[in-house]
Amino acid sequence: MTPPAIISITPVLASLVSLLAVIPIILLGGRANLREGASFVAGIVKFGLIASMLPTIMAGSTIEYTLWEIVPNLAIAFRVDALGMIFGLVASSLWIITTLYSIGYMRGLKEHAQTRFFSYFSVSLAATIGVAFSANLFTLFLFYEMLSLATYPLVTHHQDKEARSGGRTYLTYLLTASILFVLPSLIYIFIKTGGGLDFVAGGFLEGHVGGTEALVLLILLTFGFAKAGIMPLHSWLPAAMVAPTPVSALLHAVAVVKVGVFCILRVYSGVFGIEFLSDLNLGTIVTWIAAFTVVVSSLIALTQDNLKRRLAFSTIGQLSYIVLGMALLTPKGVTGSMMHIAMHAWGKITLFFCAGAIFQATGKKYISEMVGIGKRMPVTMAAFFIGSLSVIGIPLAGGFWSKLYLLWGTVEDGRFTMLVVLLTSSLLNAAYFFPIAFRAFFCKPEDSRFEAKVEEAHPCAVVALSLTAVVTMLLFIYPEPFFALADTATQHLMNR
Amino acid sequence: MIDQAPAIVLLAPFLTAVLVVLVGMKYERACFPLVVLGLCCSAAAAVQTLLQVIEAGTLRYSMGGWPPPFGIEFRIDGLNALVALTVSTVALISAVYSKNRVPEENGDKISIYYTLLLLVVTWLLGMVMTGDAFNLYVLLEVSALTSYALIAMGTRRATVAAFKYAIMGTIGASFYLLGVGYLYIKTGSLNMFDIHEVLVAENLHQSTTVLVAFILITVGVWIKMAFFPLHAWLPNSYAFAPTTTSCLLGPLVTKVMVYVMIRMMLTVFDPLYTYLQLNWGNIVVWMAVIAILAGSLAALAQTDLRRMLAFLIVAEVGYMVGGVWLANTAGLVGAIYHLIADVFMTLCVFLFAGIVFAKTGKRDITATHGLFAKMPLTMAGLVVGALSLIGIPPTAGFFSKWYLIQGGMAAGHWGYVTALLISSLAMAVLFFRVFEYAFFGVKPAEGHGDHHPSGKGKFSEASASMLLPLLGTASLVLLIGIFNQSIVSIITDFVGQFNLTGSIMR
Amino acid sequence: MKALGLIAVLGTGLLLLAASRDFPNWGDPSSPASSYRLSRHFITQTINETAVPNMVTAVLADYRGYDTLFEAVVIFTAGIAVIGILRRYGNRDFIPAGGEVHLTPKQPDLIVESTVRLLIPVIQIFALYVIAHGHHSPGGGFQGGVIFGASFILLALARDLRTAQNWVAEKRMLILACCGILIYAGIGVLCQLLGENFLDYQILHRILPTDPVMARYHSILGVEIGVAFTVTAIMFSIYSNLSSNGQMKEGI
Amino acid sequence: MELLEAIVDGMNYWIFIILMMIGLYAMITKNNLVKKLIGMSIFQTAILLFYISLGVKEGATIPILPHYYAHTSQEEQGNLVGSSDQAHAGKEASSATEGGKEKPSVAHAGSPKIDPNRFTNPLPHVLMLTAIVVGVSTLGVALSITQKLYTEFGTIEENEILDQLKSGDD
Amino acid sequence: MEAQGQEGEIVSQFWIFDLILLVFLVTTAVIALRVRDLLSAAMIFGVYSFLICLLWTGMGAVDVAFTEAAVGAGVSAVFLISTVLRTSRKSSD
């Protein structure tokens, strides 16, 4: 069953639109309202373009476009399929909301160099969508590197000592891993297959490489996409928390880290092929690596007092859920892992928005200082609670569905160890999230200022975080679009 | 009508050089336009030559009308034409760049400086185009001679470096001359292609003399290209020379020598001889690995910006020597493509270093403090050059590394592949250190506070004559990367005639 | 350093020695270098093709004329390079790190001066002879030029650099050098303009009242004169820079 | 006597290697810059010696045609080359030479046919003329660098210059 | 033909002359590099050049010999001497 491909330039435009938005953003640098208006318009156009492709993808077809053949047999090419669509939709819709939020946050804190901030923000989004819609490993790699570089000025936005060391760690990890691990694997695959790097639903590596080579390549590629934060290459994520919160929110809960796992998903499904992996029984190794990361990161998260760092470690764990789900190589597991990209994105971004809002309104960074804050910022903390529900995987929030599928996947495969791991980790999630919300609402504040009347953050920020919280809940009631997409993708991948 | 383009490539800068001396005595201000005009002619002729080569294959031009081997002949194939075009383009860019620098650094000798600059370009072009082994020696020695002068016109450290260069350069050229003599004693010919024919026809590849000739020529050329253990002359020469000198010589000299090495190995000696009979590939590639690592690590240890870049050249030479000696098509194509790409990316970073020096008067890396805010366009140029050196797509540097790594993998030489990757990382560290200085230089008032609206007043870019070459080079780096297929196809045509193992992936 | 140098030197020596066993016998007329068509052609055909009996001159200025053009430009380059490195213009107060080198002032010496006065014209005439007679005997533009330049050097040595500079000022020397190069290259370019390759002298028979072979013969003379101009000028220029440490004030 | 001849045969090659080693050693190890340059010149002349040696032919004379050759062949060349195309004549001539290789010593005085074995090979001489020029140019430039170093450092000893650089600020 | 015979004889006895020259050549080269006074070194280098020029005449390379006489023994030596006088006469090795 090969769905007919449609040739259309829409995916290219979807990626380009935010790149082009840089020009008006820089030109309008002096006038903040217009500048952010341009950002908004670009975001909406981008979302519109991606959404316009949704019906085609839902119908089981794909959209392809080859932009430029840069080296013989190696093109910058775009292809939209269901998997890419999930990610594209999530990233582009969240961009709009994040723009709204960052307006509130940046203005509230009177940050410097906002033009630069919004420009690189747009570039990062272009790269993210580029990754989502890449048709081959080369294009993927290209946009992946572009994303690493474009986010550097965002991470180091404050330009102080802390930002410098954080930025250093960030780039060292990402660039080292990608140059040392991904690039050689890429070229090796290129040579071995005689010039094929295009993603194929069932993988194209089978028959070209032996078992040991496949294992080495798998490990190189898994760790090479260090953005996925699989331990031990995870330390860049907490370090990158020096960035302004909107950056952390979009890039480190959504775009950057999700690009990492998305790349891994793509490589497993499009390069190796699920059948090939399960024939060689390579999934098991990855599940163990992922399981280790899940448990350890949850334990570390428990010990963190800095809210953003706790969220960062939580993210590391959640990312490994996705990898783990994929590595189960069962239909339900794969579906679950794809859905988790979307569900976790909405949940986690809510949490980050809340952390940012708290910091902006009160200047508090540490969880121990947030006792009783619910009285002062009820909306924020309510959203926080909903976000936590989603990340833990408790009904009333979208995260429930993806986690259900992941658990189902383990059962389907008979991997009860993994079932236990997932459940334990959910418990740990609950253990590090619930106390925050609980103490915020039900404990007596230590800080007397919290007793005062309700005083939320900048309205833009509040609107943004309420919006994401509502969507998170809506996704519980109506997970259909993502579910359908994930199902289409899974069928496509499993049935060749 | 015989086509004169190949001769004009060379004659234009040469005759302009003589004119510059004459005109410069009276009208010093006329020198700069003359230089640019001459180099423009040269570049145009080089383009014409390249187009003809693409269209009609190898181009032959006999000097004096004597058929080879009696006379001296230019035999221009894709490789020559490409490298010649590269050389003349770089010369043109550096000449434009020199507009303000030369009066500032060598104010009393403007015409002399420009003459030497044009002459060195002539020599380099001559080296690229000539088909005569002895003629190459003359050019080799004289280009070095001119370089000594261009370097010695700098600070007093540069004078010391120039002397060291003079000694080592003479040893290198003399070794080459001896090698040619050893070939001559066995073959009786001096024309490169003729020597090759005689070597093959009389089965001289078994002779010790030819072996010694090969060693002498190779070692001589290695000294000239600063291949790692023989690189001592390079760093200080390029670090302390006048700005324009290092912009012109830094990218070009070593690359032209790599071209000479390729020409000698493939055209004069046979690939069968150099690759199969001698079978030294493994050793030389390991030497290249050491060169790459040593160059990159030494660059990491530098605090002087241009010295750091000079060590990068040492590492890059390792790339190319290794690529050539991998003895397969991908490696060779990669090395030649890297030769061209590297010229422009090195030029890009050297132009940047020159601008920083001109603006701040400091040589240290810390001189880049806060440049992102002050000189965003200049920094944009550097970023492109640096990304290319690191090897990030879609810059030219990525694709050269792409082919080189392919070559390394096809040859099964994992040490070389690893060295390439490690050196990429080292360069990443290097340049991000510079970026950090440039980015964090301005301390924002306790981290926050919007001072953007007033930001426009404090831009202080370099003058257009310095900025435009930098931006032009940066865009060339991008263009060479994006249109790498057309360049690679010319190179592949050249390499294809040697029937090496392992074709590049199509 | 010494040990390293010794190793390098011995290594090179052994390498060269190893090959010398493989060399053809000393003076063997059938050695490849002597028996190859290149050498034979030069010996037997120069007279037919260029009408110059001195094969060295013919090969130098015609067959390998392109090389020789560069040879002349090498000298030119060296002259410019020495000026670039050493020349210090103006009367700026410049105190070198090593202190000013004071040479004992030159005493006018009657015998030396008269001898030199007598010798210089002879030397210069001889130089002209060497240049002009290069076709038939050893010599040519380069040797003649050096001798001519040496006559000025002699003057500067015997009298004073200033005296010599009065005869041939610095700028005039440079102009002379440029003219030399332009003569050489001009002949080459003229051939191009007439539709042949660079330096293909035989086409000049169209503008010279001779046949192609004699056109070569005469062009070789022209070329040699060009070389002589350059060499004369640059030799003296280098000498005056070196002997006055770039000041052009007092020589040695 | 035979042994002597054997030595004499290779003598020039031996001396060339010895001179070259002397020069190279001086270039590398001498501390005084002028000494280095003298070593450089010796090194270069050694190479010249090698080239000239390989042009030597037993029983041959200097590569200048005596008058009688010149005159006869000038008369000859009128109809030999005449107005015909130059490159073409070159080819003809070279093929004639190939023929001459098989039966040498046809040359006798007065004949326009020139025996190649009578004259030394002119090509190395031409090359070495150029090499000498290059050598003296290099020497001149290197000497001027030496003088500049002296004005800047006050010494022409390499180690003293390096010491000054180490202690100095520039 | 007579001329040829004479030349042949000259060549056959040439090796003694050659040998003496070569020995002198190496000696002067070593002395030029050993002597501590640079002015003497420059002078001896001139002698070396002259010897090598003689050697080349013997080998039939008259043009080269001529050039070497003018350049090596003449101009080069003068260049060296002027540099020595302009800098320092003493050498440490």
Image (cartoon, helix red, strand yellow):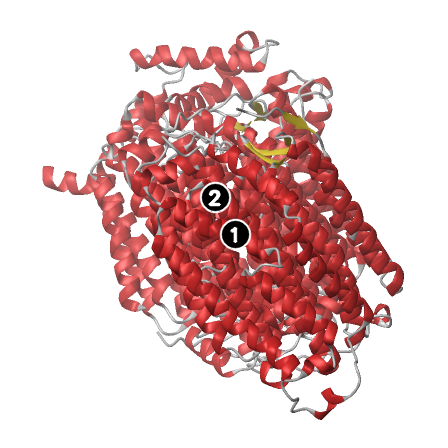
Q: Is residue B33 left or right of residue E10?
A: right
> Vertical placement of A299 versus B310: above or below?
below
Toward the viewer: E77 or B121? Answer: B121
Residue in view at x 57 percent, y 81 percent:
C97
Q: Is residue A97 left or right of residue C27?
A: right
Question: Which percent across, then down, holds residue B257?
Answer: 49, 45
At label 2, the amino acid type is: Lys
Q: Quadrant of the C terminus of chain D?
A: bottom right
Residue in view at x 63 percent, y 42 percent:
A85
Q: Residues within 10 Å of mark 2 (few under 14, many from 20)?
A: many
Which element carries disc 2, helix, strand or loop?
helix
Residue in view at x 31 percent, y 32 percent:
B273
The chain identifier of the residue carrying mark 1 reads A
Question: Which percent across, then down, holds residue B410?
Answer: 37, 37
Q: Is residue C69 visible?
A: no
Question: Which percent across, then down, holds residue B431?
Answer: 57, 63
The chain identifier of the residue carrying mark 2 reads A
Respond whether the residues carrying marks 1 and 2 are from the same subunit: yes
> Splitting the image into 4 quarters, where does residue D125 fall?
top left
The residue to which callout 2 is attached is A332
Which element carries disc 1, helix, strand or loop?
helix
Q: Is residue A97 left or right of residue B58?
A: right
The residue to which callout 1 is attached is A261
> Vertical placement of A71 versus A221: above or below?
above
Q: Is residue E84 left or right of residue A358?
A: left
